[in-house]
Image (spheres, helix red, strand yellow):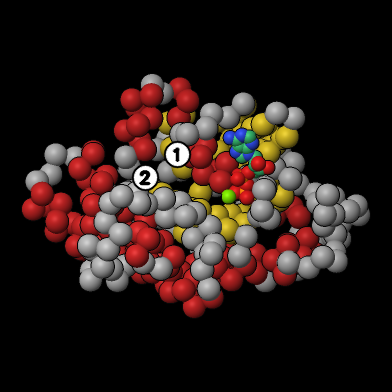
Amino acid sequence: MSGTPIGSDRYGDAPTTVLPRVPGAPRLDDKPHTMEVRNVHKTFGTFKVLQGLDLQFADDAITTVLGPSGTGKSVLIKHLVGLLEPDEGEVRVFDQDLWSLSEAERANIRKRMGVLFQDGALFGSMNIFDNTAFPLRKHTDKSEDEIYDIVLARCTEVGLERSLKKFPNEVSGGMRKRAGFARAMVLNPDIVFFDEPDSGLDPVRTSLLNDLILQMHAEHGGTYLLVTHDIRTARKVSDYVGLIWKGKVVHYGEAEEAFHSPDPFVRQFLAGDSAGPLGMD
Ligand SMILES: Nc1ncnc2c1ncn2[C@@H]1O[C@H](COP(=O)(O)OP(=O)(O)O)[C@@H](O)[C@H]1O
Ligand SMILES: [Mg+2]
C-alpha cells in the first residue's frame, strides 16, 4: 500500500471552517481490489450527487458507507451494480472498468453480485420459495431438485424454512428482508450489497438482521457493502466504515478506528450531533 489511507490526513488539527474538509488527491493502491470507484461524478439535472467519489472496498470484508438521506448511497450501489453510468470517473469491479465492457459482459459481472434492496424488492405474485428460486431459474440451468436444495438451504439460514409457501404480503417486513437476503445469496455471490437493511425495521428485528448478515458473511465470505444512515447497524456489522458527505468520501478506514476517532468531524457525524464542524446545508 502506498501512502496513508484515505482520510487519515483529517486527524490532528481542528477544522477551521463549517464545511468538512475532504481528502485532497485520492490515494489509491495500485493493487487491484474486488471493487472500487475512482473519482466518480454523477449529476441529476443540476444536482451534483456524487462529486468525485473515491473508495476501495476491502476484499472479503464488510464495509459500511454511512451518509444522511439523499447523499447518494443508493446511487453509489446503482453505479457498482452497473445500473447507472458515471458522468466522469471509473467503477471497477473484478479489476475491470464496468463501462468499458459490453452490456453482456456487465450482465455477467452482475450475476456474481447479490443485492438486498431497501424494500426487499420481492415479486408480490410469487411465494417466498419462487422469489428465492427466481435468480436460479433465470440464470442457471439447474434442475428443480437442485434448485429446491439451494433455496431450502438459503431460506433455512435466514429462518424462513417454514414460510416458503407464504406470499410477501402475508409475512412481516423483517421476513421480507430476510427473503430478499436469501434470494441475494442463491447464486453464491462474490459481492453482496445491502441498501439500508435496517430501514422500516424495529430495533430488535434490525439487530436480528444484522446478526444474520454477520453469520452469512462468516459462513460464505465475500465482499459486502452495506449503506445506511443508522450508526448502530454500522457499529454492529462493519469491518470498514466510509462516511460520505456532499458527494465525497470524508472518512474511510477501519470501523474500530472510526468509532474511536478524535476527529471532531467524524465524531459529530457518528454521534449524529447537530452541533459541531458539520454545516447542515
Ligand atoms: N435516477 C434519478 N434521477 C434523478 N435524481 C435522482 C435519481 N436517483 C437519485 N436521484 C437523486 O439523487 C439524490 C441521492 O439519492 P439516493 O442515492 O437515493 O440517496 P440516499 O443516500 O438516501 O440513498 C437524491 O436527491 C435523489 O433524489
Ligand atoms: Mg437510498
Q: Nearer the viewer, residue 71 or 222?
A: 71
Q: Which mark is residue 132?
A: none
On screen, residue 19 versus residue 181, left or right, reads: right
Measured as percent of width and height from the top left, residue 104 is found at 33, 25
Position of residue 155 relative to residue 194, above or below, is below
Q: Which mark is residue 81?
A: 1
Q: Residue at x 54, y 62 (%)?
A: 199
Q: Residue at x 37, y 56 (%)?
A: 180
Position of residue 175 relative to residue 279, above or below, is below
Measured as percent of width and height from the top left, residue 202 is found at 53, 73
On screen, residue 254 versus residue 125, left or right, reads: right
Residue that mark 2 sits on: 113
Q: Amino acid at mark 2?
A: Met
Position of residue 232 relative to residue 42, above or below, is below
Name the secondary structure under disc 2. Answer: strand
The reply to whether callout 1 and callout 2 are in contact (CB within 8 Å) is: yes
Position of residue 250 relative to residue 79, above or below, is below
Residue 56, quarter of the rendered image: top right
On screen, residue 182 versus residue 81, left or right, reads: left
Q: Amino acid at mark 1?
A: Val
On screen, residue 68 versus residue 211, left or right, reads: right
Name the secondary structure under disc 1. Answer: loop
